[in-house]
Amino acid sequence: MLYFSNVKQIFWTATAGLTLIAAAYAQTPGSKGKVVEFDAASIRVNEPETGFHFGSSESSTGGPGTGDPGMYRCSKCTLATLVGKAFELQNYQFPGRTAFTANTFDVAAKVAAGTSAEDFQLMLQNLLKERFGLTYHYSEKKMRGYNLVVSKGGSKLKESTDAAPQAAPNRGGDQHGPGTGSFGRGGGGFQGGGDHGHTGVVSFFGSARYRADHQTTADLARLLSDQLGVPVDDQTGLTGKYDVSLNWTGDNTSSAANHAAAGGGAGHGDHGGADGATPRDSSAPALFDALQAQLGLRLVAADQATARIFVVDHAEKLPTSN
């Protein structure tokens, strides 16, 4: 299947300023039948990074449900990140996302008072359609995933005790709940809390760690889904908010494949990285082991179902000018 096609290269020099302008002409109706658009929006193209830099420096803040509901900003974000946020996609739903990571952008958009989270997403979708010429469709794909459950020894999650920070709601919905037969039915998202920005994962030389407060087990399931590249559904039955700390190492994709081949049991063995990958820290466990040892949770193979996959038909690599 072709996930990325007909991309036309446009050479465009970005201006240094970040001047807000009237938003693009929107075509998608909002929750009340109106056409929704940002009050004003600007997209600036960043210069390509040179030399060594540590991981991703993307930052996504503001918008409905956050501490700054009137202004949305996305700094050094790729088109893949913007598309994922606009359509609430999890990584497995957007397998063609690597084709949209060559350039990074600074986005600033003024959001009208009282804008709902649903209308905010429509505004971002409309902006991408107008400025990048984005067209797309959905396809269906058979896929196996995992259920996140509590281990026999019980949960080791630490319940949050202080006041939760104001955050945008996670509306991932039921990914493959009983009887639905469909992964990604609710869309999911890249968010791990806060302003729907990063998942909170920091990776370096084959090891990774995740730190986040006031997280639900549904938030954790979305994180695991993005790390493994397959659907993960929260079946823990836990309803609290937790301060999550998780350390692991190894190639997550290989781990998932090996674990599935082993039948999803706890004794899945050592899941090292692929040949030629950065050597992992032998003192840290693989993700499946870390989840059980550190959080008292485990992943069990789920029945095959139909995943809803996002396919880009066309998108410009650079936006039209402000």
Image: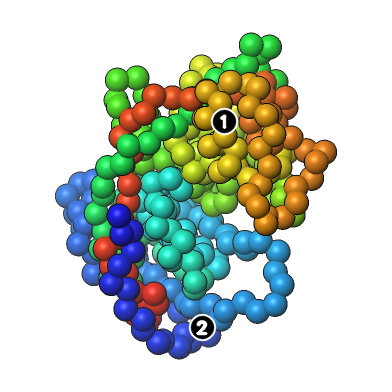
Q: Which mark is nearer the camera, 1 or 2?
A: 1
Scheme of image coloration: rainbow
Q: Residue furthest front?
A: 275
Q: Quadrant of residue 316?
A: bottom left
Which residue is at 24% across, 54% downward? 137
Give the labeled residue for mark 1: 259
Is 279 situated above or below 228?
A: below
Say which of 180 and 126 sits in front.
180
Q: Mark 2 falls on what kind of element?
A: loop
Say which of 45 and 142 sits in front.
142
Is 99 situated above or below 22?
A: above
Asked whether residue 145 is in view, the answer is: yes
Is 248 situated above or below 176?
A: below
Is 290 on the left or on the right of 14, as rendered? right
Residue 88 - label: none
Asked whether residue 243 is in view, the answer is: no
Q: Amino acid at mark 2?
A: Gly
Q: CA distance from mark 1 to mark 2?
A: 50 Å
Give the labeled residue for mark 2: 17
Q: Quadrant of residue 75?
A: bottom right
Q: Residue furthest left?
A: 33
Classify mark 1: residues with Cα within 10 Å, few (<14), some (14-19) or many (20+).
Answer: many
